[in-house]
Amino acid sequence: MNEEDEFTFGFSKSKDKKEELNEKKSKSESEKEHKEEHKTHHHEEKEHSHKEKAREEELTFDFKSVTKIFDKYKGFIIPLFLILICIYVGAYYRMAPNNLPATDDWARSTVFNYYKTNIKSQIDQSYPNLPDANKNTLVETQFSEFYSQNKATVEDQIKQVSQSFKEQFKDENGYTYLGDIDSYFWMRYAKNIIEKGQYGDEIINGKEWDTYMLAPVGAGAIPTLYPYIEAFNYKIMHFFNPKMTLMQSIFYVPIILSLIAVIAAFFIAKKIAGYFGGFIAAFLIAIHPMILSRTFGSDNDIINIFFPLVILWLFLEAFESKNKLKGIMISALNGFIIGLYSFAWGGWWFIFYFILAACAVYVLYYVIVDFKHIKKGFFKYIKNSDISNVLIILGVILVFSAVFISIFSGVATITHIVSYPFSFLTIKSAAKANLWPNVYTTVAELNAASWSTIVDSVGGSFLFIISVVGIILTVMKKDENGKRDVKFAVFLIIWYLATIFASLKGLRFIMLLVPAVCISVGVAVGILYQYLNNWLSKALDLNKIITRTILILLFLLILIQPIKTASASAKSEVPIMNDGWYNTLTQIKQNSTQDAIINSWWDFGHHFKYVADRRVTADGASQNRPQAHWVGKVLLTGNEKEAVGILRMLDCSSDIKAFTAIDSYINDTSITIQVMYQLVLLDGNNAKKLLSQYMPEVDASNIINNYTHCTPPEDYFITSEDMVGKSGVWAHFGSWNFNRAEMWVNVKGMTRDEAVDFMLSNKDYNLTRDEAEKIYFEIQSLKDENEANAWIASWPGYASDLVGCSLENEDMLTCSNGINVNLTSKEMLIPTNDGIKLAKRVGYMDSGSFMVKEFSGNIIEYGGDIIKNGNSYYILLMSPEIADSMFTRLFFYEGEGLKYFDKFSDVRDVTGARIIVWKVNWEGK
């Protein structure tokens, strides 16, 4: 009998004695009373006795039943409790951006600065000669006194200001805008599924077609899983809440998928490291800062956490199942999940390869370890060993994966599986084989990551080291039969090595490493916890409850830094979309024709399509196309006529048809591009004459009338504040040198003589032998694709914001950054370490016309612009190439002197960033 039983028994026994005494007393008193009274009292006493017994039995039953229930279901209760903790914390941080906590800090800073500015102004008047350091100290002192006396008022103002900020990030229904860009891409397809019952905007020739991409041609809309998940989730949530909007409902999709991933992570780590290890792994998955930051809003990155973890979980469940039929059924289910993954993301194959590699290494390991037994009979050994189970599971996964991949993604997905890893390796090549620039070289998340960046991104050196320890402990751990079970370790090692290699090629692939790190940390903590608990309780002769409590508290300290980082990430997250952008795009929608086209740099194309409901030249799903060069050239060129000519061509044929048609005759990309540069500057008749030199007149006429000089639809050209910082990118692609690209693609693998002969044979290069040899050695000196990119085209950009200047006399400006400008000669005098130098190119307005003056001699490679606004003067510094660019003239000169661009709208959003929309006037003013 245990302590609990003894306690329960003793408690019941003492109650029985008390009942006997009460009964005797009741009987003695009843003899002295009337029989009727005796009956009444006897009835009451009996009823009282029954109540006492019932109460005692109830207490006794509660203690025993709770213990029994817990013992019976603890295998369910404990995991459920631990998983619910992880789910709650994960949901809390994922929901935080919906409430925009960042605006509270903004409001506090705004209100505090307002009062401090007023105090500073009073101090300046009272103590004009006081040093700034003393003034600042005085400001802080007086503000502290003011705040302590008016705290309630100030805090109320902070709340009001914060609320006004929050309203700028919410739609008309009061829902917070989705935070990123790609969410709007998937949301538009989800909307099509809900409203049209199809993925694309239209069905053309039996194919789903996105009519909003690559306007006006459009592009094939290849269905993927994520918008279907969003549409399904919306239908469910809308059923229970008819006021639920599509945008709000899909905000919850990453939350739901992440919670399932948390469950998978828990059971994966639990298999080898127990409940505590599973809890740590699941908790890290729930709050890992990188996963959070990449899955706020409703981008589909969460599928690369969800699917790998679920696939690994099912793989291990099948692997360890003692029932072969059950293992086969789980493997078949895993094949189905892999098929879904192939439908969800083009990089699905990595986890498929991991399974193949893990099984192969596992079999090889046991073949080596048990080689002596194998020599006695290979097939007999295979049949009677665990290897047969591995091969069966692998075979089932392969068969069912092939079936479901074919169903969901098509047979071609299987036939091309071998080529996928090789296409990944060329994603960052500077120039494509067709000589067009590779826009992926400038996509931030595809930039190569350093080792330190990888380690920091997965949680820092400490967490990374613990994860490596987890893998080592996994290798060393033995099963109940005393054999090393390497399957889990093999899978994690392969996952680590492959994703680290991928991450070194592109930052975005670090997220694929994160699940492996989280699970490995959980395994390390779980195994160390088990070992130390047993060792300490024996060595120190302590109760295991004490050692468990101490160890759990110590190991939980590991979670402090990830929690802090997750909290900071969640609280600082604000949507890119805000009322400034939303209202601007809505204005375009309400005031434009249905076939209107929006032109701008590609980044916000998904926003334009969804909110403005209009077609775009380029977006985040089509940026790696020739349109990047043409839009970049529109922004870069100083020739307004060229800019409008390019826009006309883009709006007529998206360049795809024009270039293809012309190059089918010329068959030389560089020459075709040069011809197109001339075409956009000419009127229709002269352009037709030019093309007739390369093709029959009837074909030239067709190209001009339909592809380059058609009557274009309405065009809205957007210049926004963010494009200032992106100037190096759009100017790089706009100035792309196709001749140099051709040299790089061909010459880098040639000998000197072959290279020189190649360059001299191309008349378009117009090189001497010495020049050709010089270029050959330049190309050979380029170390990688990044250097080649910069050699083909430079990266012009803005070097400053607008800088205020004061007019010292009639013709000399003195600017706050130390630069002086002679308004008569237009000389911009820039102080350097080598003395005063002149800006190479200076732009300015003169009697309504934009002028550029170039200087030589004692110059510095800078461009500068002199901008007058009323009676105020400003200067702007940049690379010389963009001193007279269309972007400079549209955004900083506000279109002054331009004939083909009419200002449509001009707003500043809640962050202060400016958004200017121009309607293209095809006829000119």
Image (spheres, grey):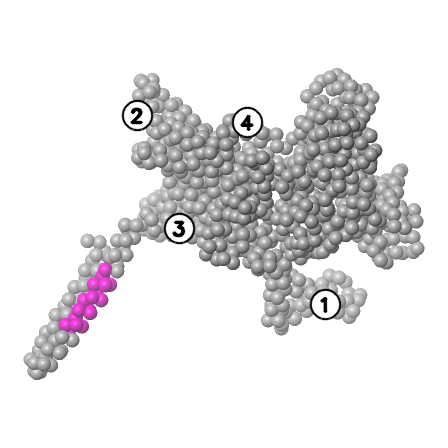
Observer-nearest of 72 and 518:
72
Q: Residues within 10 Å of mark 1 (few under 14, many from 20)?
A: few
| Mark 2 vs mark 3, CA separation in Å | 38 Å
- Could you tell me which residue is drawn at 20 percent across and 69 percent down? 51
> SS at mark 1?
helix
| Mark 4 vs mark 2, CA separation in Å | 37 Å
Q: Position of residue 584 (x, y in %)?
A: 68, 54
Residue wearing tag 2: 384
Front: mark 1 or 3 = 3
| Mark 1 vs mark 3, CA separation in Å | 53 Å
The kind of residue tagged 2 is Asn
Mark earlier in primary sequence (2, 3): 3
Observer-nearest of 663 and 399:
663
Q: Residues within 10 Å of mark 4 (few under 14, many from 20)?
A: few
Residue wearing tag 3: 82
Front: mark 4 or 1 = 4
Q: Magenta stretch?
A: 45-61
Residue wearing tag 1: 118
Up-down relation of residue 905 to residue 115 (above or below): above
The kind of residue tagged 4 is Ser
> SS at mark 4?
loop
The kind of residue tagged 3 is Leu
Q: Position of residue 532 (x, y in %)?
A: 38, 44
